[in-house]
Image (cartoon, rainbow, N blue to C red):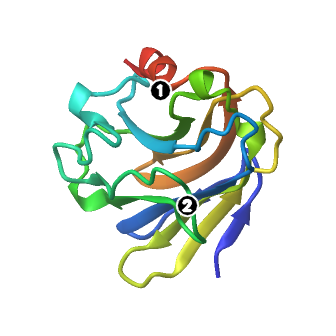
Amino acid sequence: MAINLQKGQRESINAPKFTIGLGWDTNSSSTGSAFDLDASVFILGDNKKIIADEYFVFYNNLKSPDGAVEHTGDNLTGDGDGDDEQVKVDLSRIDSKVSEICIVVTIHEAEARKQNFGQVRNSFIRIFDTATGADILKYELEEDFSIETAVEFGRIYKKDNNWKFEAVGVGMKGGLQDYLNKYQ
């Protein structure tokens, strides 16, 4: 049974291989433009910066150089139930310089499409054991992000040689480039 987290709550991840599932539903857009939400992963060192450009995993770079983090591909619509995008993580392969994995979801071309996370509902991040499929934890975003176009869903970080997940749920008005500026 998965642990349902609240914003700011932390929980240990004991599975060496797990999958991060991200899901959302979109309201009908008054602009008539389809929504394209994108999951991105920033793999950070102790200085809270990407350890190398190749450790930014997203729809144009699906795998980290160490093979520890793999994005399964871009979902352009968010249609259907369950996970819309997934990221597989194998902690046994992670580079020793890595201390944090930050999971961000952005709205592609949000400004041009006049879209924001206030038009997105049922957003969640879940982590499940890749081998068994058993849910480990889940965090549902409940805030109304009426101006935000990007949300940091959560982070996985190493503390005392153990990996933990923190439910972050912090939005910003900006896009992928703003997160790149923050983490590069």
Q: Find residue 61 and report its horizontal and vertical position in percent.
A: 25, 40
Residue topped by disc 1: 176
Please report contact status of discs 2 and 1: CB closer than 8 Å, yes or no.
Answer: no
Which residue occupies the extreme front position in the image? 32
- The answer to whether residue 133 is left or right of residue 12 is left
Q: Quadrant of residue 171?
A: top right
Q: Which residue is drawn at 64% across and 29% down?
A: 149
Mark 2 secondary-structure assignment: strand
Q: Where is residue 170 in the image (x, y as percent from the top left)?
A: 69, 34
Seen from the viewer's position, the closer of residues 28 and 182 is: 28
Q: Residue at x 51, y 60 (%)?
A: 84
What amino acid is found at the position of numbered circle 2 in the picture?
A: Ser
| Residue lying at 28% horizontally and 38% vertically, measured from the top left | 60
Tell me if residue 57 comes above or below residue 77 in the rendering.
above
Image quadrant where residue 70 sits: bottom left
User: Relative to the observer, which residue lies in front, 116 or 89?
Assistant: 116
Q: What's the amino acid at mark 1? A: Leu
Which quarter of the figure is the N terminus placed in?
A: bottom right
Q: Looking at the picture, does residue 125 appear above or below residue 98?
A: below
**For residue 168, side relative to residue 19 (left or right):** right
Place of residue 139 in the rendered image (x, y in percent of width and height, measured from the top left): 68, 58
Image coords of residue 71 (percent x, y): 33, 53
The residue wearing badge 2 is 12
Q: Which disc number belongs to residue 104?
A: none
Q: Is mark 1 on a helix, strand or loop?
A: helix
Q: Give neighbour class at mark 1: few <14, some 14-19, many 20+ (Cα, 10 Å).
A: many
Mark pair 2, 1: CA separation: 28 Å
Which quarter of the rendering shows the C terminus?
A: top left
